[in-house]
Image (cartoon, rainbow, N blue to C red):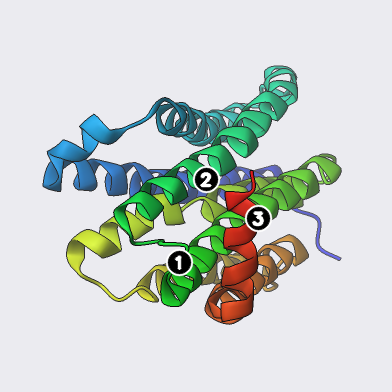
Amino acid sequence: MKVATSHSRSDDTRFLWFFSLFITLIVFGGFALNWIANPDSLNRISVWTGLHGACSAAWYIFLLNQIRLSAAGNYSTHQYLGKWSVFIVIAILITGPVMAVEFYHRLAGFGIFNPEDAQARIRAGGFLGGTFLQWLTFLALYLLGILTIKKPVHHKRFMIAAGIQMMPEGLNRVTHILGLPGYSMFVFMFLTYAMLMAYDVKVSRRIYMSTLVSFGLFIVLATAMNTVFKTQAWGDWAVKIVNSL
């Protein structure tokens, strides 16, 4: 078993900081590109959407700062701020689903998710299923990060994977504006994980279990969104549940 030296830990932290910065720029860039291409969309931002956007932005800034503190050896501040991350996560898990339900009702009003139309219910089911499973996966990755807090190599990767899990919020805007097929979002996320796994192999000659577990959860999400969540039965059930709220 190889024991990482301080130099290798420093290199690892440096790579993961730039990797997290890359993820952050993609997400922020997706929203910025959407607002530039559709400036009127700014007028349609609701209170819940604004709150969710602020919470999500806080997560990425928090993630970058935590990695920076770790690289600087400021572990006491890192641990202190880490305790406050639970409030960001709770806020994301509250505002995200509420925003999704609000968005569903807005599109239902436009007829896109018309509950009387079978095909529209399938579209709505895909949106609702994918969105809610995304938040559950985000929570699972965060909890895994907490459970591995004494194993930095895994702790960092689970927390970063939680950030990757939220990338669709920015990516779907990029793919829509550029006219790319819907599956391109999954391809990009797959390549993002591939980049992390390639780094693990190059530096450690192995793929860490934390990376594999995170990637596996992403595969579950992508598979569900392209199978179960596209069925009529799921769409009918999901729409019925949301309309009853």
Callout 3: SS: helix
Q: Residue at x 85, y 44 (%)?
A: 147
Could you say whether the residue bearing mark 1 is in a helix, strand or loop?
loop
Q: Which mark is residue 101?
A: 2
Residue 132 in sight: yes
- Identify the mark at residue 116; answer none if there is no mark: 1
Q: Secondary structure at mark 2?
A: helix
Which callout, 1 or 3, points at the residue further toward the start of the chain? 1
> Does residue 143 sit above or below 218 in this rendering?
above
Name the kind of residue labelled 1 in the image: Glu
- Disc on the earlier residue, 2 or 3: 2
54 relative to 148 in the view: left or right: left
Decide: few, some or many residues near mark 2? Use Cα within 10 Å; few <14, some 14-19, many ≥20: some
The vertical placement of 28 against 120, above or below, is above
Amino acid tagged 2? Val
Q: Identify whether 221 is placed above or below 28.
A: below
Q: Give whichever of 242, 209 is nearer the camera.
A: 242
Q: Position of residue 244 (x, y in %)?
A: 64, 48
Report the amino acid beneath label 3: Ile
What is the quadrant of the C terminus in the image?
top right
Q: Residues within 10 Å of mark 3 (few under 14, many from 20)?
A: few
